[in-house]
Each structure stands twice: as structure tokens, then as C-alpha cells.
């Protein structure tokens, strides 16, 4: 298909849904930027969505972000924030491995951000690193510049080193733990990302994080799609009986729920908040808009980088921070899909009793080349089991009278939810935006 034809189809489809979703589209904003300051990595995790999931676009990226791109980023962020009435903006320095750029880049980055954005917009900063390059000098810099730190580690050494390996195939655990201990010795706070491995012992994973004297951890589902399903899952069938990911997380949740010295686990904390009627912003669950964009080393503006698992160059929306405003990038079909993914869900999700908790699941996990994003999460059945189990635990803390006072909350089992979906989906009409969801099964249109 010719480029001109693709652009015409894209424009027509956006125009069709603009009037239907005008209020939602008008409210799209960006509050956080994942800034890919380095496009290469010093390790080679087997499950990495950047390098080992089919997207090879990193090969054509500059290794590091240059000054022109950095300055353009801050200027465009300022324009966007002033237009949207935002007084703060968060920059997540990312890669690849961001520490490969060297200490001077970080100092210059923060200095330029403050010079361009202050006093109207307050910039804040964090970094996601594998931790291998951390030393005392890095720790001094993190504290000086007030940069929050996230490190990735997948549990005990044998579990971590199954997937988090270097380019020679050797495990990284000992080097990562050395970085963690260096940060602790320098009194630098740490949050940890840990990808769920259903072959591992979940309680051992939980206790190991505590043993490392880390207080905050995000347990993440592995990034897979219907075209490339995760281990133990064949498809998104509602009748699937095995729920390995729910079972793994439930064991940790039960431990966490009664633990007097519990870890700060965002997935659990936010889910409990939602179950109690609160509101949160998290692209994994809930119904809030997603307000994040990614800036590649060449200045390319993209939706969330995990969407790279959907296909080679899937995230390329033909926008660049040097030539486009952030608002322009937010108008691309894929950007709108990501930012409004909790509002535009499949028919099955639309009738689900726990939609307000699950939010349809993380957008990349809904993808198939047959239906685009017109699917529930590939982890749907696991999510149903996990959140209904959590609801039961939480609501059992209240008396019957208290539950009635809340408005007569019904405690659901995962079988209740699946039965309700089967009944309701037969009568439900296909959502008016279904064609838009299926638009993305042709990646070059995104």
C-alpha cells in the first residue's frame, strides 16, 4: 500500500471517531516522558521488548541522545505544559541502559531542564537502570540531582540469571546486587522492577526482595501478545482453566496482605485502592487515561515502548520532538489508542463486572494481528482470578453492616465474573469504536 493511501485511511478513520470521542481526545495530555537517552544496552535480557521481541528499529537509532534533541524536548514540553495547564512534568531517563551516556550527560540534562522549564514548570527526574554500572560517583550524582532510581532484578540468583543475562550469556545477579549494595551504602533510595516467572517460588521472590533491604517493588507480567502468548497460556479463551500468573501473584498477595512489615507493591496497593472506590493513574489497571510518551534517541516521539512487542517499527508514528509539537504526536492513531486504552476496550471487556479495576489490561497484552486491539488481555482469566481474590480478602475485613453501608457491595468469585460475561456478551452490541481497535492489525497504518 502506498504511503499516500495509508495517510488517507488514517486521516479518515481519525476523523470518523473524532466527533464520537471529541471530549476524550481534547483531554489527552502528556505528564511523563520516557526519555531513551541510550539506544543500546550492556546486557541482553531474553524477554526484552526492545531487543528480543521482533522490533529491530533500535539498530537505526543514534547510540545516545544529543544536545539538539534534549533542548527540543524541553522546549516542546514547556509549550505543552503551558497549553494544558500543567505545573510539573516528570522525565524518566531510560534506554537501553541509560548509564552508558556518562555522568556529564545527566548533569547537563538536569541543568538544561531547569533553565528552560522553571519557574513555570517544575521538572522531576527518575532513572530505570540494570544497576551494573553503579558506583559511588553515580550515587553522589543521583543525590545531588535528586534523581529517583529504579533497578531491575527478577528474584534469587538462579531465577534472575535465567533471563537477565549479558551479551556473553552470563548471569547478571551478582553485579546487580553489588550495585544495589553500593546505593544502600550511599543512602540512595531504590525501587525494584521484577518480571513474574511462574516457574519460580513466589514467596521466595517476595522474601528475597526484603532480604536485600529493598522496600518497594513492582511485579510485572511478561510482555506478550496473542501472536506470541506467554508461557502456560495458549490464547485468551474465557474458559481457560489454568491461571499460572494469577496463582503466582495470589500467593504473594496473601503473604503481603497480612505482613506487618509489608513491601510497597504498586500493583497490590493500587488495586486495593480501586476496590475501595478510589482512583489511581497506572497504565496496567484502572480506568484513567495514560499520560506517557516515549522520546527515542533521535527525537522520535512514540507511545509506550512495550508496544514494540506488536511488530517491527509498530511504535513509529512519524513524529519527532525536533519537528513536531507534543500535541501533534498525541493525535496519531496509536497515541490516541494508548492514551484512551482504558476507555476503548473489546466487547467482552465492556460487559465485565471488574472493568473498573482491570481497565481491560495493559494495552500491548491485548494485541493480535487478526483483531488489532479488539481483544481482552491475553492474561484476562488470570486478571479476573487475581482481582476477585483480592476483593474477597479486602471485603472480608469489613462487617456485613459496613458493606451494606458502602452500598451493598457484592463479593464476586472469578467464576461469577466469567458467568456474567458469558451472559452479558451475548446481548451486548459491538462498541462503536471496534473498527478503530481493529485498525491496528495493519501495523503500517499506526
Image: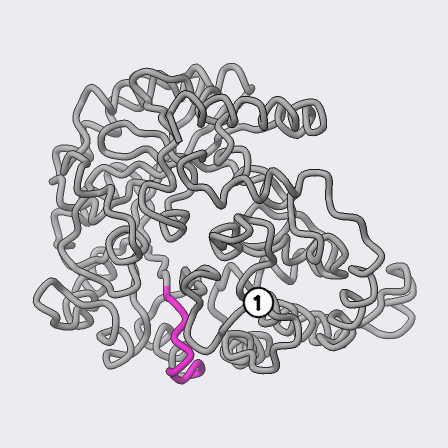
Say left or right for 319 vs 440. left
Say left or right for 20 vs 252. right
Q: On the image, which quarter does residue 425 sit in? A: bottom right
Residue 264 screen position, x and y as percent: 48, 63
Residue 154 screen position, x and y as percent: 32, 70
Q: Residue furthest front?
A: 1
Q: On the image, which quarter does residue 407 sit in? A: bottom right
Work out which quarter of the rendered image holds the C terminus and state it. top left
Q: Residue at x 55, y 20 (%)?
A: 84
Q: Residue furthest left?
A: 168
Q: Residue at x 22, y 48 (%)?
A: 96
Q: Is residue 375 magenta?
A: no
Work out which quarter of the rendered image holds the N terminus and state it. top left
Where 406 falls versus 145 (above or below)? Answer: below
Which contiguous range is marked in magenta?
Answer: 194-203
Q: Residue at x 38, y 26 (%)?
A: 2
Where 140 falls versus 237 (above or below)? Answer: above
Residue 63 screen position, x and y as percent: 14, 38
Say left or right for 385 vs 135. right
Q: Residue 369 or 160: which is nearer the viewer?
A: 369
> What residue is disc 1 on?
236
Crowding around mark 1 (Cα neighbors within 10 Å: few <14, some 14 to 19, many 20+) is some
Q: Residue at x 90, y 64 (%)?
A: 408
Q: Helix or strand or loop: what does disc 1 sit on?
A: loop
Say how the picture is coloured. Answer: one colour
Q: Residue 408 or 374: which is nearer the viewer?
A: 374
Q: Residue 171 or 127: which is nearer the viewer?
A: 171
Amino acid at each position: 500500500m502506498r504511503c499516500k493511501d495509508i495517510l488517507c485511511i488514517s486521516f479518515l478513520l481519525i476523523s470518523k471517531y473524532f466527533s464520537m470521542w471529541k471530549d476524550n481526545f481534547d483531554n489527552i495530555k502528556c505528564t511523563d516522558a520516557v526519555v531513551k537517552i541510550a539506544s543500546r544496552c550492556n546486557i541482553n535480557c531474553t524477554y526484552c521488548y526492545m531487543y528480543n521481541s521482533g522490533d529491530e528499529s533500535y539498530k537505526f537509532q543514534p547510540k545516545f541522545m544529543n544536545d539538539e534533541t534534549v533542548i527540543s524536548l524541553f522546549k516542546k514540553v514547556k509549550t505543552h505544559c503551558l497549553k494544558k495547564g500543567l505545573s510539573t512534568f516528570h522525565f524518566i531517563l531510560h534506554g537501553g541502559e541509560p548509564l552508558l551516556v556518562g555522568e556529564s550527560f545527566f548533569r547537563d540534562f538536569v541543568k538544561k531542564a531547569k533553565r528552560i522549564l522553571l519557574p513555570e514548570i517544575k521538572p522531576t527526574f527518575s532513572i530505570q537502570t540494570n544497576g551494573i554500572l553503579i558506583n559511588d560517583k553515580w550515587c553522589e550524582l543521583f543525590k545531588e540531582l535528586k534523581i529517583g532510581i529504579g533497578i531491575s532484578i527478577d528474584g534469587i540468583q538462579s531465577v534472575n540469571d535465567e533471563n537477565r543475562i549479558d551479551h556473553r550469556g552470563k548471569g547478571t545477579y551478582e553485579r546487580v546486587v553489588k550495585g544495589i549494595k553500593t546505593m544502600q551504602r550511599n543512602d540512595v533510595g531504590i525501587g525494584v522492577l521484577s518480571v513474574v516467572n511462574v516457574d519460580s517460588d513466589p514467596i521466595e521472590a517476595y522474601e528475597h526482595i526484603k532480604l536485600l533491604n529493598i522496600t518497594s517493588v513492582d511485579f510485572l507480567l511478561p510482555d506478550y501478545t496473542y501472536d506470541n502468548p506467554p508461557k502456560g497460556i495458549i490464547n485468551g479463551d474465557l474458559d481457560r482453566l489454568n491461571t499460572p500468573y494469577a496463582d503466582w501473584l495470589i500467593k504473594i498477595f496473601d503473604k503481603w496482605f497480612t505482613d506487618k512489615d509489608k513491601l510497597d507493591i504498586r500493583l497490590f496497593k493500587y488495586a486495593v485502592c480501586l476496590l475501595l472506590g478510589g482512583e489511581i493513574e497506572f497504565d496496567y489497571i484502572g480506568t484513567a487515561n495514560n499520560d506517557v510518551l516515549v522520546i527515542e534517541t533521535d527525537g522520535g516521539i512514540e507511545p509506550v515502548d512495550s508496544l514494540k512487542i506488536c511488530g517491527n517499527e509498530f511504535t513509529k508514528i512519524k513524529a519527532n520532538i525536533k519537528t513536531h509539537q507534543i500535541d501533534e504526536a498525541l493525535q496519531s492513531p496509536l497515541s490516541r489508542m494508548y492514551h484512551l486504552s482504558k476507555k476503548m476496550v473489546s466487547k467482552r471487556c465492556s460487559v465485565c463486572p471488574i472493568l473498573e479495576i482491570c481497565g481491560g489490561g495493559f494495552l500491548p497484552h491485548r494485541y493480535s494481528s487478526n483483531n488489532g486491539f479488539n481483544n481482552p488481555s491475553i492474561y484476562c482469566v488470570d486478571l479476573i482470578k487475581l482481582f476477585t481474590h483480592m476483593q474477597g480478602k479486602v471485603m472480608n475485613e469489613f462487617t456485613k453492616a459496613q458493606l451494606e453501608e458502602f452500598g451493598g457491595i457484592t463479593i464476586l468469585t472469578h467464576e461469577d465474573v466469567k458467568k456474567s460475561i458469558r451472559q452479558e456478551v451475548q446481548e451486548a452490541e459491538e462498541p462503536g469504536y471496534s473498527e478503530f481497535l481493529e485498525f491496528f492489525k495493519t501495523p503500517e497504518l499506526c
